[in-house]
Structure formats: structure tokens, C-alpha cells
Image (cartoon, rainbow, N blue to C red):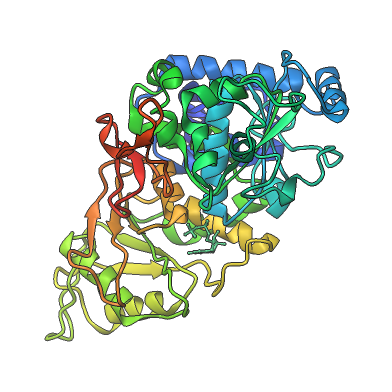
Amino acid sequence: GHGTMESSKVQRDKLIGGLLAPGFDEQSCLSRYQSVLYRKKSPHLLSTYLLERLREQEVLQKKCGPHTESYKKAIELLKSGQDVKVGDCNYLVWVSYSGLGNRILTITSAFLYAILTNRVLLVDGDKGTADLFCEPFPETSWLLPLDFPINQFKNFSVGSPESYGNMVKTERIRSDGSFKGPKPAFIYLHLAHDYDDYDKLFFCEHSQQHLQRIPWLIIRSDNYFVPSLFLIPAYQEELMRLFPQKDAVFHHLGRYLFHPTNVVWGLITRYYDSYLATADEKLGVQIRVFDTETGPFQHVLDQVLSCTLKENLLPEVNAQQPIVSTRKLRSKVVLITSLNSGYYERIRNMYWEHPTMNGEVISFHQPSHEEHQDSDKKMHNMKAWAEIYLLSLSDVMVTSAWSTFGYVAQGLSGLKTWLMFKPENRTAPNPPCRQVMSMEPCFHAPPFYDCKARRGTDTGKLVPHVRHCEDMSWGLKLV
Ligand code: GDP
């Protein structure tokens, strides 16, 4: 139960350093102000400028949000189709696409882009957005109304005539930013993994100037494209002020935006209170296998064990002696997440059948094993979100290469996790894992283009804070 000590802690810290706005109805989203009971205080620098800009964004979201006069006016202009001037309320519409980890990363990227360009962020409700996340902005909704008039927006993809890339390619937009024919009221931004060189021009400053004049932007992505925003000169100064600690972008914005709904919060808190709460130390192990077959695979099990043993996250077992006297060390729980239950069963058995070398007592837990990704099912998504969140409450974490699910858990936790490299040819890599340079997610499909020189360049070598990722040599991450 929540004693008086805990409730005073809630009062003190519930806005997590001013990151969250006061004034929400607490019952409708218990996680928002209760997270402080479960999460350690963030040790990462939070700038007062970011707090100011968040408050300004909240004002904009409320002023221009669905059902306001401004919104209705903007929708009428959008319907009229042509030559619309930008007004006080301009919009960025996020299209729901890909797995949950990807969606969380792209909403965050879109939100930061909305802040940088003074746009209102509206999110498409597909794949259960509203079942998973509370409203992040006070006294308004970020959900795109169902009667949004561009109803074909879900079908936009690479090469769509409405896309920025295609408009450049066909010279519907000229290089000076003028239009052949009337200026469109909206443009589609295709920033998904299969985007082409024309779409990638989005990351050039001149494109940003073109886009400034368009009141509605619709974005589809499955990538954390924030690192490349840091390479656009027009945004650099603002980004430095917002994030003096550059590797905390997702950490802060993620904690600001993503509050589990009450149903998901129930999944999280019941699990945590039953299995994790009393331990002195919590190790999270996220096992994500990108293989056509489901597994479990011996090489993945080997990799998890060699990583955790080598880095002293788990003790060795003693195969020689039946009993090693138990020492009352710090108690340890291990939370394992995976689509498959095989790894968990084998590891748990190993520590049941043999004592640990140091007498340490450890328990293992895995909340679900869903077998397959099924991102359109409500309970499946809720469990995925609950597990990401539970992982993020760990004290130490092991994550899997290439996985946005793991990136989100890592970023929310604020930890530098131990990242397991991607196995090649079904063999455990050596070394099995390394500690990451920063807690930021990796941008998997960045552009390699020098907009000024108009030729290819290694965008991971331009500034010290944008580097190639540990788990993907061509990816980019903030450090
Ligand atoms: P990524 O594919 O690892 O980058 O992560 P995504 O979250 O984008 O997509 C994978 C999806 O598979 C998740 O959203 C879940 O639906 C499912 N999934 C993968 N791993 C797990 C897991 O450990 N637990 C649960 N519950 N679901 C998982």
C-alpha cells in the first residue's frame, strides 16, 4: 500500500523535475504521476529551456488541437486543396506503422520535429495508440480525428505523388522551392527504411525551407531519425539549447510522452509488485532474435550466458558440488523478455539444478511468450508495452542488437545497457556484448549525403556527437 512517506514522495517528485505538466486528471492516467514510485530519479541533465519549450508546445497543441476553431479552419483549407498559406496552426500527422518499439521511436522523432518547426503533432489511432498511451498534452487530444479528410493517407508509400521525394523528382517542386502548378496544402514525408534518395533530401536545409511553407505534413517512418536532425544547420543551435546533454533526447522526450494507460499500468504494477519489487538488484535481459525460424537457438542461449557471465551480471554455477552454502547477499531478480520461452526455461533450470559459485540466490521471471509478432492485436501490444516498461525499471540491462523494443527500454531507463551483437551464421559473436556508448536509439537507415557539396559523405564522421552505432555499422546515434 502507499503509506504517507510514499505519498509525500509522490507529491515532491511527481512532475519528475518539471518535465510533466500539472493539472491532468490523475485517475484517468494513474501512471503519469505514479511512475515516480517505480522509477529512480533521472540522473540526466534536463534543461530549463526544454521545459519552457514543452510548455509552449502544450499551449500550441491546445490552441490548435482537434475540435478547436483553428483546427476546423485548417481542415477547411486543407479540403479546399490549393495554395494555402501557413497560419498560426500548422500540423504534423504521424501515421501508425510497424512494431511498437518502432512506433514509439518515430512518434518521438516526429514530436521533436514538431517542436523544431512549431507544428502541432497529431497521431493516427491505428494499432491501438489510445489503448497504449495516455494523452500527453493537457486539455486537448493528440489523436487525429477519424474524419480527417485526406483519408487515403494510410496508403501513402515510397513514390506516392503526394510525397516530397516524388515532388522533387518530378520537379513539381523546383530547387528554389517554387511549385510547378499550385502549392499543395499538404505534403507526405516518406521516411521509412525503403525511402529513396529524393525522400532523403528531407534532411537537407533547403528542403526544410520548402516544407516550412506547407501547413500540413503527413509522416510515415519506422526509424529514429533524430540523429540526422542534429546535422541540419538550421536546427543545431536550438537542439543544443534543448539538449545540452545530447545523449538524453529519447530519455527525456520518451518519459514526457509515453504514459501507459490504466489497463497497461495494471499489467506493469501487478507484475512488478508480485515478482520484482523486493529484490535488491534487478537485471533485465531482452532477447530478440531476427531469424526466419522461431527458435530457441543454442547460439542465442550461449550468447546470453557468455555476456552475463563475462560482465559479471550473473554468477557462474557450480557443476561440481550439489550444495554451496547460501550467503545472504543482495537478492537478485532477473526479468527476461522474449517472444520465446525457451531461453528463460533453460537459464532458470540451470540455476535450479546447480548452486551458484558465490551462493547468491537468484530468481527468474518472464511475463509472456507471445511466439510471434502480432502488432495489430490489442492485448499483444499491451503486453509488449508492459514488458518494455518493466525492463526499463531494471538496475542493469542486457539488450539485443537491432531491436527498437530494446532501445525504448534502454532509453526510458536512462542506463547504458550491455548490447548483444547480432549473431551471424547462427553462431554467438565474440565478444558477445559490449556496453553502449550512449543510451540513445540507433537510426537504422540514415542518409549519407552532403547537401552542400551534393555528394555522398559519411554522416557518422561530421560532428563528434553523431556517431555510428555499436550494433549497426551504418546506423547513426547521438552520444
Ligand atoms: P523490434 O522489431 O525489435 O525493433 O521491435 P518492435 O517493437 O518494433 O517490433 C517487435 C514486436 O514484436 C513488438 O512490438 C512486440 O509486438 C513483439 N515482441 C518482440 N519481442 C517481444 C517481447 O520480448 N515481449 C513481447 N511481449 N513482445 C515482443
- Total of numbered circles in the picture? 0
Q: Position of residue 116 (x, y in %)?
A: 53, 22
Observer-nearest residue: 139 or 2? 139
One can see residue 43 in this view: no
Q: Position of residue 311 (x, y in %)?
A: 18, 59
> Which corner quadrant holds the C terminus?
top left
One can see residue 214 in this view: yes
- The residue at the point 84 percent across, 23 percent down is 77
- The residue at the point 18 percent across, 86 percent down is 322
Q: Position of residue 269 (x, y in %)?
A: 55, 52
Residue 465 versus residue 352 in the image, above or below: above
Q: Position of residue 24 (x, y in %)?
A: 68, 27
Q: Quadrant of residue 190?
A: top right
- The residue at the point 44 percent across, 30 percent down is 229
Q: In this rendering, would 13 be left or right of 434?
A: right
Q: Residue furthest left?
A: 320
Residue 169 versus residue 338 in the image, above or below: above
